Image (cartoon, rainbow, N blue to C red):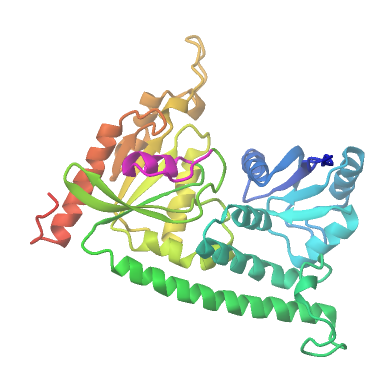
Amino acid sequence: MKKELNVTEKPIETAVLIGVINKQQNEALAFEYLEELAFLAETYGVETKKTFTQKLEKADKATFIGKGKLADVKAYIIENKISVVIFDDELSPSQQRNLETELGVKIIDRTNLILEIFSQRAQTAHARTQVELARQKYLLPRLTGMWTHLERQRGGTGTRGGAGEKEIETDRRISRDRIAQLQEDLRIIDKQMATQRKNRGEFVRVALVGYTNVGKSTIMNLISKSEVFAENKLFATLDTTVRKVTIENLFFLLCDTVGFIRKLPTQLVESFKSTLDEVREADLLIHVVDISHPNFEDHINVVKQTLIDIGAGDKPTILVFNKIDAFTYVKKDEDDLTPATKENLSLDELKNTWMKDLNETCLFISAQQKNNIVDFKKAIYDKVKAIHIKRFPYNNLFY
């Protein structure tokens, strides 16, 4: 007789989120950022129970937030059996240690949360190497007092440095050795990928860029008729996908890239060099925006600044406002004489604001519902054809 296995589901971790209000971000902005942090937490698999904010001129050196607010957070954690506290800003190693000691639960900052999500999402050896390198760089200064995640990597008394070597020094040495090895692995992979890009022949390269979760992979699937993983979560795409695409009689290469986000950890930008090289070396960018998101204008600015930071801010661009099917607005009553806000503008009214003065090609589509896709494809065709004629004037093979 077979024994029945008792499979118990792992309980969902619960979290509180903490953000600060200061000169750089007012109360409204702080809450917007905490909403995004809650979405990040959900993507990671953590349920948010409460958010805390505090007005601070500058962060407390020891615990980031003040003693009074820390006491409030601790009381809530104990009463509600909270297992994780997530901060919207990056904590110093000493702040993280002090908070873990004071609150007695796991402390995660925004950078660590994004790194953990990237770890969950990385599929290929290349992406896993990139993420692991970023994680090791983040963890190195934070090894003191952390969980002994390196314990199994450490040998017995025969490790270099002998039995007298301090445990923390051993951990740091292992981490540095690991970083050196990952950097070498990545150097080899990056070299291979650079060779692949050079061998793509006389094709115009087009890269999809945008904030995370705006629908880039859905557009990729629609245009290239491929099956790139797409879902309504942050960072669904980490691995760069390149497809040969045909529109009418014109061939070009289309690349789907990792989404950008506010405060993208510098460790990730450094590690994802070869992925971002796809953007740097592209002839044309398709900047995808989720127009149904209340903060889509902020997202545009974050992406534009990130493109400038990686040296791709001057590329020819098609600005695509996606998810028009999900766009909503609050219609004002006829007798309401108060000035209209952004929330009161219909899509047609929005098109007649700053968007009509843009120098770049601007389109409004729904990739999910396949709205305005014919115009979208024509805009790509015209741009790619113009680049192709300029780049390869004697090659009329593709048009």
Residue 61 visible, this orientation: no
Residue 308 visible, this orientation: yes
Q: Per the image, is 216 magenta?
A: yes
Q: Residue at x 48, y 56 (%)?
A: 239
Tell me how many marks there are: 0
Residue 44 falls left or right of residue 16: left
Residue 134 falls left or right of residue 192: right
**Residue 118 position within the rendered picture, expressed as x and y whole percent measured from the top left:** 59, 55
Rendered-image quadrant of the N terminus: top right
**Residue 35 position within the rendered picture, expressed as x and y whole percent measured from the top left:** 64, 39
| Residue 231 sits above or below residue 301 on the image | above
**Residue 180 position within the rendered picture, expressed as x and y whole percent measured from the top left:** 60, 79
Residue 333 falls left or right of residue 224: right
Residues 49 and 183: in front is 183
Residues 76 and 22: in front is 76
Q: Residue at x 28, y 63 (%)?
A: 200
Q: Residue at x 64, y 65 (%)?
A: 135
Place residue 350 in its image quadrant.
Answer: top left
**Residue 160 position within the rendered picture, expressed as x and y whole percent measured from the top left:** 77, 89
Residues 5 and 280: in front is 5
| Residue 212 sits above or below residue 59 on the image | above
Range shown magenta:
214-231
Place residue 169 in its image quadrant.
Answer: bottom right
Residue 44 falls left or right of residue 69: left
Q: Per the image, is 283 magenta?
A: no
Residue farthest toward the top in the current orientation of the protein: 335
Place residue 394 in its image quadrant.
Answer: bottom left
